[in-house]
Amino acid sequence: MSSYAPTALLAAARAAGDRTPADMARRMGVPYLAAYRWATGRHAPGPAGLAVIERTYGLTPADLIRGGAAA
């Protein structure tokens, strides 16, 4: 079973100078609540969110999802 963990997202955001979900939301151009949920791990990003994260921080879905078939 695969699971979303925000560790890679938070590391990439911090490397880009984003310290808070508000900073992340501004950079990604998404609502604050979406960035907050992704940053805290409360919700996994959907396909559109994954695309925004990849464009913004260079993380692929594989970078954000742990587990999968190999787990």
Image (cartoon, helix red, strand yellow):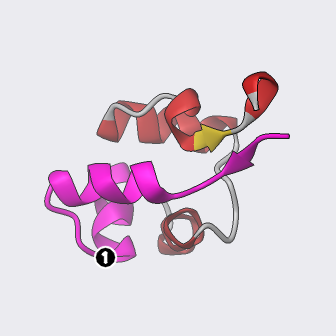
Name the outermost residue toward the right.
Answer: 1
Q: Judge left or right: residue 68 versus residue 21.
A: right
Name the outermost residue toward the front.
Answer: 71
Can residue 29 be seen in the rendering of this structure? no
Quadrant the C terminus occupies: top right
Instruction: Give the mark count.
Output: 1
Residue 20, above or below 54: below
Image point (57%, 29%), residue name: 62
Image point (68%, 54%), residue name: 44
Residue 62, above or below 43: above
| Closer-to-camera residue (71/13) | 71
Quadrant the N terminus occupies: top right
Near mark 1 (Cα within 10 A), the count class, few <14, some 14-19 or many ≥20, is some
Residue 54: image location, x then y, percent: 42, 32
On whether residue 27 falls in the magenta region, the answer is yes
Q: Secondary structure at mark 1?
A: loop
Q: Judge left or right: residue 68 versus residue 30.
A: right
Name the outermost residue toward the top.
Answer: 69
Q: Which residue is mark 1?
A: 20
Q: Inspect the image, locate mark 1, and give the three-letter code of the amino acid beneath it.
A: Thr
On whether residue 62 falls in the magenta region, the answer is no
Tell me which segment is drawn in magenta. 1-29
| Closer-to-camera residue (6/27) | 6
Residue 7: image location, x then y, percent: 45, 57
> Would you identify the image quadrant in which residue 33 lies?
bottom right
Residue 18: image location, x then y, percent: 22, 64
Image point (51%, 73%), residue name: 36
Residue 19, above or below 12: below
Image point (31%, 76%), residue name: 20
Q: Judge left or right: residue 20 versus residue 51.
A: left
Residue 41: image location, x then y, percent: 61, 67
Can residue 14 be seen in the rendering of this structure? yes
